[in-house]
Image: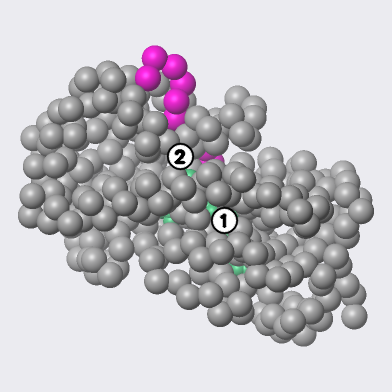
Amino acid sequence: MKSFDVIIIGAGPAGLQCAKILAGSQKSVLLIEKNKIIGPKVCAGGLTRKCFNYLQLPDYLVERTYQKIIFQTPFNKTILRFGENFLYTVDRKKLGQWQLEKLRSAENIEIKNGSAVTEFKKNYIIVNGSEKIGYKYLVGADGSNSAVRRFLGVKTKLTGIAFQYIVPGRKFKDIQIFLNSRLFGAWYAWIFPYKNSASIGYGCFPMVISPKKAKENFLKWAKSQKIDLSQGEYQAAAINCDYRGHKFGNVFLVGDAAGLVSGLTGEGIYQALISGEEIAKLILNSSYKCEEIKKARAEIRIHKILLVTIYIFGPLRWMLYEIVVLAVKNKFLARILLRVLT
Ligand SMILES: Cc1cc2nc3c(=O)[nH]c(=O)nc-3n(C[C@H](O)[C@H](O)[C@H](O)COP(=O)(O)OP(=O)(O)OC[C@H]3O[C@@H](n4cnc5c(N)ncnc54)[C@H](O)[C@@H]3O)c2cc1C
């Protein structure tokens, strides 16, 4: 049986970043991705400034850069200006391909795409139903519907669903967030423009609102905004917000597989990158302290508290939204809100 020191399952931002840190080390690494093409993923591709700085993305990879964000409620609209670049959109395929490019010269990394891991055993995996490959360390970077997480028996209760239409055209210029308690409950609808298209979407927690009802409400909202979705490509995927640990003996979970998505904002790319990096460092040095994962978890916890607070406002939630959107017209309060959200 072929064997590697480290097997990473999934070549999303988390798996690719984990491989990048292990590149050039003494460890033999296998990165397995079920899709033939590395990169594409149902995602709005929004990056916060901390994520952009972390990645050190070249300009050509940025679809759009934003110095402002528009918050809208049924009665109010506030434009938050940052005075500097603060939010970015990227194409996930290009981001994945750029991350992959960085691994090309690493002799200790083997990449197996178009290969799904179908079974997990204590010291080996089975690929495409037949090929056995051994490991010392296994990294589950296989996203929100993680098979590695299921293999570990880690429960997942707090899972959201986010869906979007990728609408062609250059009609939309700004990042916009729509808070409408009656239609979206404690979540929001978004418009994230790219160069030649835009992601227009919404997320929900099925334990609060059924995905069917959520989509109905979203379509109602789009109609009220005179947004034509008829040419848009519909996409949907789960987001796992249920963190229950990242180290399980010689098996690790990173990114969405670890449940590191913010339940409030839906941001997950940054957490995927930093957790991928920290787990690689932990594999290289068993006494490494994963401080960045700790920090990300602390932020996610704050987001969770805010989300629950918004939720328990129930029928008065609309009033909370109106107050917040009016309050952030004040620059100081706006900065605090941005700090908390991003
Ligand atoms: C609609 C939507 C919009 C979003 N918008 C944003 C946003 O604007 N900004 C943001 O920061 N986050 C956003 N997110 C969240 C973001 O997409 C994720 O947090 C991020 O992709 C997590 O990266 P990851 O590497 O952990 O997992 P993924 O990107 O999901 O990568 C997992 C990889 O594992 C592979 N895989 C799965 N199972 C197997 C298997 N058995 N064998 C081999 N390979 C396997 C998959 O094919 C995939 O390539 C959004 C999510 C959704 C659903």
Near-viewer residue (312 or 190): 312
In x, y percent, where is residue 149? 57, 72
State yes or no: Cβ of the residue under disc 2 lies below 8 Å from any atom of ligand 1: yes
In x, y percent, where is residue 20? 76, 46
Residue 46: image tag: 2
Using the rendered image of the protein, determine whether residue 268 is visible from the camera's viewpoint: no
Within the image, what quadrant is residue 235 found in?
A: bottom left
Residue depth check, mark 2 versus mark 1: number of the one nearer the observer: 1
Give me the residue at 51% from left, 66% from top: 244
State yes or no: Cβ of the residue under disc 1 lies below 8 Å from any atom of ligand 1: yes
Q: Quadrant of the C terminus?
A: top left
Q: Which residues are magenta?
A: 82-91
- Magenta-drawn stretch contains 111: no
In x, y percent, where is residue 79? 25, 24
Helix, strand or loop for disc 2: strand
Give me the residue at 77% from left, 67% from top: 137
Q: Quadrant of the N terminus?
A: bottom right
